[in-house]
């Protein structure tokens, strides 16, 4: 990937993105406990505006997507579409045990494993549900990743190299349940 020229406009946009991240929340079918904690995080008691964090309803304006709940087969295409609508660079936080692995819903006929089985995840937040301070810590971790990615010219430097084992897994089709 070629690095964008460091014009004043690009530097200003990058500075604004790091200083004021906009988040969008997507519920993929959870029990809503994580959603309640996200709402509590956005309330004045925790004052996330001191970090410049602003909740946006549209993923087209968001820098960070917070995904709550296990990904169901019905929500898989919707989640992928929302992720594709986000502008680059985009960051994803998988929230709670359900977002990381499917949680208590893991193994059900209509549940995928976790958010990372559908879209790439940058930060995982443990807990069922995670506390608001853990959510704030995840967003601040994303801000650190944004700064590092900006210094390295993009997210490619964080990608793990693909090992050549001779056997490659076939790409999964939309709606297909992983084995």
Image (tube, helix red, strand yellow):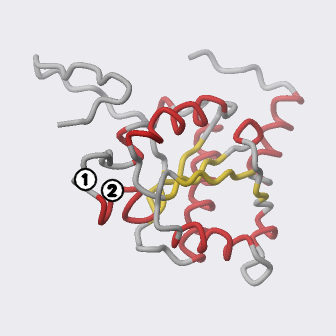
Residue 156 screen position, x and y as percent: 49, 29
- Between 129 and 123, the one nearer to me in the picture: 129
Quadrant of the rendered structure where residue 84 is? top right
Q: Which numbered disc covers residue 102? A: 2
Count of residue discs? 2
Q: Secondary structure at mark 2?
A: loop
Label located before the other in sequence (1 or 2): 2
Residue appearing at x 32%, y 48% in the figure = 111
Q: In this image, 9 relative to 115: left or right?
A: right
Are discs 1 and 2 less than 8 Å apart at CB? yes
| Residue 28 image position (x, y, % from top left) | 49, 51
Is residue 170 depicted above or below 161 in this figure?
Answer: above
Query: Where residue 67 sits: x, y (%)?
Result: 53, 53
Specify the quadrant of the image occupied by residue 158. top left
| Badge 1 element | loop
Residue 147 to residue 81: above or below = below
Q: Position of residue 128 (x, y in %)?
A: 41, 74
């Amino acid at each position: 990937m070629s690095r964008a020229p460091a014009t004043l406009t690009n530097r200003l946009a990058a500075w604004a993105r790091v200083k004021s991240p906009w988040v969008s929340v997507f519920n993929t079918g959870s029990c809503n406990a994580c959603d309640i904690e996200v709402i509590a995080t956005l309330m004045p008691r925790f004052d996330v505006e001191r970090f410049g964090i602003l909740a946006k309803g549209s993923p087209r304006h968001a820098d960070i997507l917070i995904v709550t709940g296990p990904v169901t087969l019905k929500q898989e295409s919707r989640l992928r579409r929302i992720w594709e609508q986000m502008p680059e660079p985009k960051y994803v936080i998988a929230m709670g045990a359900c977002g990381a692995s499917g949680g208590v819903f893991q193994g059900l006929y209509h549940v995928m494993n976790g958010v990372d089985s559908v879209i790439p995840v940058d930060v995982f937040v443990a807990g069922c549900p995670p506390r608001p301070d853990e959510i704030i810590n995840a967003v601040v971790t994303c801000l650190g990743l944004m700064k590092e990615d900006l210094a390295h010219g993009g997210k490619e430097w964080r990608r793990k190299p693909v090992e050549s084992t001779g056997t490659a897994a076939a790409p999964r089709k939309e709606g297909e349940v992983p084995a």
